[in-house]
Image: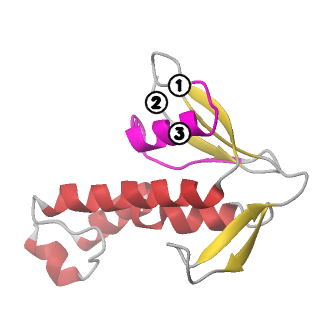
């Protein structure tokens, strides 16, 4: 069985934020700081209070993946066909992979997925440009296992 990380919104719908078998240590540390219990297999289920930090952790994963792929001549943000061809991969295969993985869109999709559960206020002092607050009576969870 694959290890999967899910975010669940206030409507009880969930989506898998990372690919199969991805256990991202900064997310586990964040879950612990949020008061979640993490077992010996790094499985957890935790209510999230700090949405902005959750988004930052997802962004850290995206950047880490880009750095990892850059070592091998790849760039997850460069979708130009000439760059893909240089790496010996067809455009169709690359786009299919990107759609399935959706790595570069994970943080943006998380915000979209949670938009009914959070209020965002512009904040130039914030690292991400705004401050998010979970709406009264709404709950957001992150789980893995």
From this view, report whether residue 122 is shown above or below residue 58. below
Marking on residue 43? 1
Residue 34 in sight: yes
Check disc 2 and report the residue beneath it: 3
Q: Position of residue 129 (x, y in %)?
A: 56, 79
Q: Position of residue 50 (x, y in %)?
A: 65, 53
Going 11% across and 59% down the picture, which residue do you hit? 71
**Residue 47 inside the magenta-drawn segment:** no
From this view, report whether residue 22 is shown above or below residue 96. above
Nearer to the camera, 138 or 113: 138
For the residues bearing labels 1 and 3, Cβ distance under 8 angstroms? no
> Dot 2 lies on which element?
loop
For the residues bearing labels 3 and 2, Cβ distance under 8 angstroms? yes
**For the view shown, which residue lies furthest in the right direction?**
137
Structural distance between the alpha carbons of marks 1 and 3: 9 Å
Mark 1 crowd level (few <14, some 14–19, many ≥20, 10 Å Cα)? some
From this view, report whether residue 139 is shown above or below residue 36. below
> Dot 3 lies on which element?
strand
Marking on residue 5? 3
User: What's drawn in magenta, residue-wise?
Assistant: 14-37
Upstream in the sequence, badge 2 or badge 1?
2
> Dot 1 lies on which element?
loop
Q: Position of residue 106 (x, y in %)?
A: 49, 61
């Amino acid at each position: 069985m694959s290890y999967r990380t899910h975010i669940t919104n206030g409507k009880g719908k969930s989506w898998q934020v990372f690919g199969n078998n991805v256990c991202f240590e900064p997310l586990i540390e964040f879950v612990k700081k949020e008061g979640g219990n993490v077992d010996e297999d790094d499985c957890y289920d935790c209510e999230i209070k700090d949405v902005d930090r959750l988004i930052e952790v997802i962004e850290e994963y995206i950047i880490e993946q880009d750095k990892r792929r850059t070592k091998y001549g790849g760039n997850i943000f460069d979708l130009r066909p000439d760059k893909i061809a240089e790496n010996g991969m067809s455009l169709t295969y690359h786009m299919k992979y990107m759609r399935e993985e959706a790595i570069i869109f994970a943080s943006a999709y998380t915000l979209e997925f949670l938009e009914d559960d959070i209020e965002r206020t512009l904040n130039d002092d914030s690292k991400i440009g705004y401050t998010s607050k979970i709406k009264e009576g709404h709950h957001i969870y992150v789980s893995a296992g």
